[in-house]
Amino acid sequence: MSDDRPLKSAFELAMERLRQKDRDEGIEESEPLSEAQKERISELRREAGAKLAEIEILHGKDLAAAGGDPEKIREREERYRIDRARVESRLEDSIAKVRRRG
């Protein structure tokens, strides 16, 4: 190899691939976040964390109430998975809105 450029780390290569993927998908590189945006994102993450903790507690109670019935346990596990995914999806959407608003 006659190239004088230094080799890139695995991290640098991965970040380049992610940036290229974002460009391919039409996602623009954003400007640095303002302090207000950072605070709002932190607040959103705290709220989502609290909601996930609540869901976890309720899920534990639901499993205990299932009484070992495999069908009830399966239904409750599926409901739990859906509830978690919903909270996580809403968090991602909310963060994306904060980033876009600038």
Image (tube, rainbow, N blue to C red):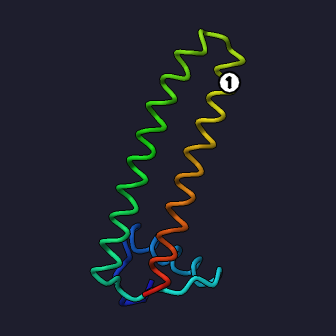
Residue 37 placed where, x, y %? 35, 78
Under tag 1, what secondary structure? helix
Question: Residue drawn at (55%, 60%), measured in percent from left and top?
Answer: 90
Amino acid type, callout 1: Arg
Question: Residue drawn at (59%, 76%), measured in percent from left and top?
Answer: 21
The front one of 46 and 10 is 46
Quadrant of image for the C terminus:
bottom left
Residue receiving disc 1: 74
Quadrant of image for the N terminus:
bottom left
Relative to 43, residue 55 above or below? above
The front one of 101 and 19 is 101
Residue 71 placed where, x, y %? 72, 18
Residue 47 placed where, x, y %? 39, 55
Q: Residue furthest right?
A: 71
Relative to 2, residue 13 above or below? above
22 left or right of 102 in image: right
Q: Residue furthest left?
A: 35
Question: Residue drawn at (38%, 76%), measured in percent from left and top?
Answer: 8
Question: Residue drawn at (60%, 39%), measured in percent from left and top?
Answer: 81
Relative to 12, residue 31 above or below? below
86 left or right of 42 in image: right
Residue 3 placed where, x, y %? 42, 89
